[in-house]
Amino acid sequence: MILSMTGFSSATLTIPFKKKGKINLSITLKSLNSRFFEVNCKLPFALTHLETKLIKLFKSKLYRGNIFCTVHMSNAAELTTQVNASVETVKGYIEAVEVIQKKFNVPGQLEISDLVSLPHVFELPEEPIDDETASIVLKEFEKLTDQLVESRVKEGQMLAKDIENRIQVIQQDLKKIEARAPFVIEQKKQMIQQTFATVLAQQAHENLDAFIYSHLDKIDIHEEITRAKSHLENLLASLQSASNENGKKIDFILQELFREINTLSAKCADSEISKLAINIKVELEKAREQAQNIV
């Protein structure tokens, strides 16, 4: 199965919390291209202890890509415990005021109304969610991950179809190259014979034939064509494979195909074959661009 590395899913949830309230969560999950598996989680404090479990969940279902998980809690106050005074902060404010009064001889008294209006005088510690709520949240994340996989499957089908279409074009051009190759070799043979006939006229005919065939062997592209056909068959098999991780294999096969076509065009210096080889390389490059997005 061909899976794209890009996908998106989102949900808004209302979950009961310790039978005394509810928490509202807005979750977005998206994945982008990456050579490896990477996860970036932005979680509220109450959910940070779930990060390791979330990473394991994503790894088990998404395999590869850059995964971005963002959770926004709209009513975090539901998770706050009692309000605490930040004693050290208040102490710091009082000492700072005393320094100002002594240094600049400023009169006046610090009132409680002045203190409570200062920032960070009170602490509102959040309480992590309990195990029951955490279980509900993880189940919702599993559903979202499955939705993301579905979007990856749909895009993966389009990627596979596009690459298959390019394979068809490559196969047609490869057939044309295969059909032209014997004609090119015959042309080269005649040219060699005409060029060297006079020079080698005094030598034995067997030596002339050996000389000709040694040069023709250097431009023979039969092996390259055979290997290219084999790579195309492997490529099609990979596109139809049941495996969920095919991207790196497909990319490697495309690299090998590119190498064979380069060798083929270099060995057989024929304008028509060079033109067809360029067309194939263009299709291979486009296929490689698509393969970069496959898991």
Image (cartoon, rainbow, N blue to C red):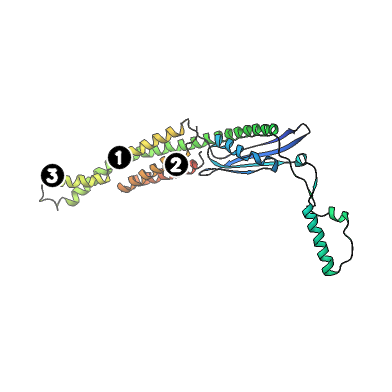
Find residue 257 and report its image quarter: top left
Can residue 251 be seen in this snapshot?
yes
Instruction: Say which of marks 1 and 3 sits in front.
Output: 1
Q: Which residue is at a point 21% across and 46% down the rendered structure image?
A: 214
- Residue tagged 1: 223
Per the image, label 3 sits on a secondary structure element best described as helix
Gap between marks 1 and 3, in whole Å?
26 Å
25 is higher (above) or lower (below) than 117 = above
Q: What residue type is labelled 2?
A: Asp
- Which of the 4 image quadrants contains residue 111? bottom right
Q: What residue is drawn where x is 19% and y is 49%? A: 194
Instruction: Give the left or right position of residue 77, taking residue 227 as reference.
Output: right
Which residue is more in the foreground, 133 or 251? 133
237 and 66: which is toward the camera: 66
Percent x, y of residue 219: 27, 45
Question: Measured along the vertical axis of the image, is residue 19 above or below residue 5?
Answer: above
Q: Is residue 64 left or right of residue 134?
A: left
Nearer to the camera, 119 or 246:
119
Mark 3, Cα crowd under 10 Å, few <14 / some 14-19 / many 20+, is: few
Q: From mark 1 to mark 2, how far is it between C-alphas? A: 22 Å
Classify mark 2: residues with Cα within 10 Å, few (<14), some (14-19) or many (20+). many
N-terminal of the pair, mark 2 or mark 3, is 3
| Pointers 1 and 3 in contact (C-beta within 8 Å) | no
Residue wearing tag 2: 251
Left of 252 or right of it: where is 56?
Answer: right
Q: Which of marks 1 and 2 is in front?
A: 2
In the image, 281 versus 96, the foreground residue is 96
Secondary structure of the residue carrying numbered label 2: helix
Measure the C-alpha gap from mark 2 to mark 3: 47 Å
Judge depth for marks 2 and 3 and give the one in front.
2
Tell me, yes or no, whether the two marked residues, 2 and 3, touch with CB atoms within 8 Å: no
Circle 3 sits on which residue? Answer: 206
